[in-house]
């Protein structure tokens, strides 16, 4: 089964044997309830390992950003703390959702790719649908695009959706 088969409607969306829980390599906070922290969430089994790999790459790229500022001579725990601070400061730890059976906001006649659990939203408050000035840094976007994912921030007009990968 391939992702394109999902989108062509050959595989039904929704919960079931196709959804799995993944453990994120860093902790998220729920965008709609920032006092709640999560370390795992559901996605489609076809993207599960790749999404974990991308989030691990995000951590590595964040560490590089921290080292650019603080140098390369600090302890591992220092870098771990600074990476967590960077993810919080840039709001990249704000989880907006992955699996969610629903229609597209831009087209209520069609299902969102979230209905299959093959998309993730990051920081919807500051990177929502139609936002022409996203705050997600390029190094974060690069981690997803390096694996062939599409960033909604590259879409044009009112359809731009920078929270969406």
Image (cartoon, rainbow, N blue to C red):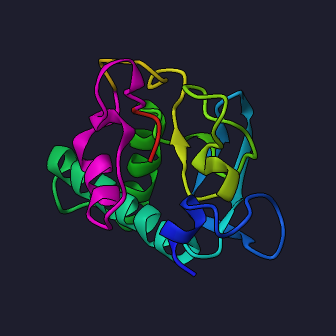
Point out the residue furthest to the bottom here.
1
In magenta, the rendered stretch is 135-161
- Classify residue 27 as left or right of residue 137: right
- Against 61, residue 90 (above or below) is above
Q: From the image, which quarter does the N terminus lie in?
A: bottom right
Seen from the viewer's position, the closer of residues 137 and 160 is: 160
- Classify residue 60 as left or right of residue 128: left
Write down the quadrant of residue 12 in the picture. bottom right
Residue that appears at 73% across and 59% down: 13
Residue 27, x across and y down, in percent:
61, 53
Seen from the viewer's position, the closer of residues 156 and 124 is: 156
- Against 83, residue 20 (above or below) is below
Residue that appears at 53% across and 77% down: 49
Point out the residue furthest to the right here.
16
Residue 106, x across and y down, in percent:
54, 25
Residue that appears at 65% across and 67% down: 44
- Classify residue 73 as left or right of residue 82: left
- Classify residue 104 as left or right of residue 64: right
- Against 109, residue 165 (above or below) is below
Write down the quadrant of residue 15 in the picture. bottom right
Residue 145 shown in magenta: yes
Residue 33, x across and y down, in percent:
74, 29
Seen from the viewer's position, the closer of residues 61 and 153 is: 153
Residue 113, x across and y down, in percent:
58, 50
Residue that appears at 73% across and 73% down: 18
């Amino acid at each position: 089964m391939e992702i394109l088969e999902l989108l062509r409607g050959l595989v039904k969306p929704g919960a079931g044997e196709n959804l799995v829980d993944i453990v994120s390599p860093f902790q998220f906070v729920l965008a709609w309830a920032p006092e709640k922290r999560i370390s795992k969430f559901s996605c489609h089994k076809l993207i599960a390992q790749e999404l974990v790999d991308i989030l691990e790459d995000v951590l590595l790229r964040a560490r590089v950003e921290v080292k650019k500022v603080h140098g390369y001579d600090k302890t591992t725990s220092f870098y771990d703390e600074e990476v967590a601070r960077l993810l919080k400061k840039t709001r990249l730890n704000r989880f907006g959702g992955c699996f969610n059976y629903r229609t597209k906001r831009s087209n209520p006649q069609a299902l969102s790719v979230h209905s299959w659990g093959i998309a993730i939203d990051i920081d919807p408050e500051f990177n929502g649908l139609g936002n022409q000035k996203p705050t997600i840094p390029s190094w974060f976007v690069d981690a997803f695009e390096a694996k062939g994912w599409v960033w909604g921030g590259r879409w044009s007009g009112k359809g731009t959706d920078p929270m969406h990968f």
